Amino acid sequence: MVEKLTAEGNKEIGSVSVGARRRVEEDRITEIEEWKESKEKMERKNNIVIFGWNGKDRIEKKEIADFFQEEIGLENMEESIEEIRQTGTNRKMVWVKMKKLEDKKKIMERKAMLKGKKVFIENNRTKKEREEQKELKKRVWIARNQGAKNVKVGFGRLWVEGVMYRWDGFEVIGLCETWVEEKGWEVTKNRLPSEWSWDYIPAERVERRESARGGIILGVRKEIAGQLVEKRKGMIKREVRVGKKMWDVYSIYNDREGREMLEELDELDEWVKEGEEEREIIIGGDWNARIGEMASVEELNGGEKRWSEDPIVNSEGRMLMDLIDRRG
């Protein structure tokens, strides 16, 4: 399908496919989002946030300067403070804007002196940076739960047993119900990021005139990708290395129901049993299963139970949760 592009006065200036136009629009949206993120970072670059503040309702610059002197040994900082604002529940969070980036760096270099106290200092992060930092802290919990002793998190970085990992978006991507057939895989693969290791299960045509469907694409960043790749109908498995620990990552696409899905779950269960017992596993994909609020992720959510807009639990969802319960 092709649409014509016209300038003012309805003068034709060329033709472009709908898919190409959509990609241009998506690229433009990405550029705008990146520009907004960059602009917000620039606006926040001299800012810090003090959490756990226990001062008066109306705070003055002198109080903050006294805090810097008494707690982290920085003197004569009152003139370096441009603006302050008290926010948060019970006004226990103080936003501070420094006049110079060098003054902010002095504070951040000494913030570790507050370790063990109820008050601490952080960067004034953007929403995207806060989400990334939250994900890094979740990974700290996972690494420690696996027995790692030397684990620490910095701004956009994670260290596990001396190995540094930098946050740069996703590390594993699974795409389900793709339309990529075997004959089109090389073309598709060449368009994917070269920093990733890619594997796939081709889409298939049930009827000759129908579109191919049911494909899977699994990508892993090369620096953490293991060697093992296994494929079965509707399932693909890949090794992933996290520090010194190996994980098995499964990407599944299920288009079956009832007894057929039960057979697929039993097959997956046997496949998992065949793997290394000491490894952790992650199973993701599209199950076409509805589990409502059955799942519990209280440990990771600080005691909060799973919340879902869809309260319905279907038979496929119950079978899936039964498998999870059996696997522990």
Image (cartoon, rainbow, N blue to C red):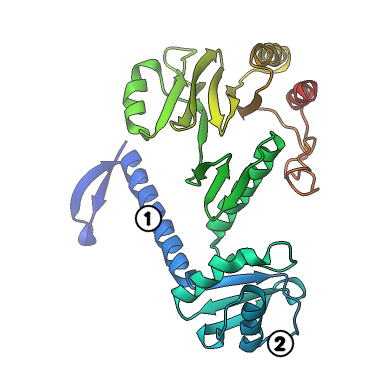
Residue located 56% across and 44% down the image = 159
Residue type at numbered disc 1: Glu
| Residue 127 marker | none
Residue located 77% across and 49% down the image = 302
Labelled pair 1, 2 in contact (Cβ < 8 Å): no
Residue located 54% across and 83% down the image = 81
* Observer-nearest of 222 and 64: 64
* Observer-nearest of 22 and 229: 229
Residue 23 x, y percent position in the rendering: 35, 44
- Neighbour class for label 2 at 10 Å: few (<14), some, many (≥20)? few
- Neighbour class for label 1 at 10 Å: few (<14), some, many (≥20)? few
In the rendered view, does 261 fall on the left or right side of 217? right
In the rendered view, does 327 fall on the left or right side of 233? right
Residue 135 visible? The answer is: no
Residue 63 visible? The answer is: yes
Quarter of image, res 72: bottom right
Residue 30 x, y percent position in the rendering: 40, 52
The quadrant in which the C terminus is found is top right
Residue 34 x, y percent position in the rendering: 41, 57
| Residue 58 marker | 2
Residue 185 x, y percent position in the rendering: 37, 21
Which residue is tagged 1? 31
Residue type at numbered disc 2: Arg
In the rendered view, does 208 fall on the left or right side of 321? left
Callout 1 secondary element: helix
**Relative height, residue 150 to residue 68 (above, below):** above
**Relative height, residue 46 to residue 75 (above, below):** above
Residue located 51% across and 72% down the image = 106
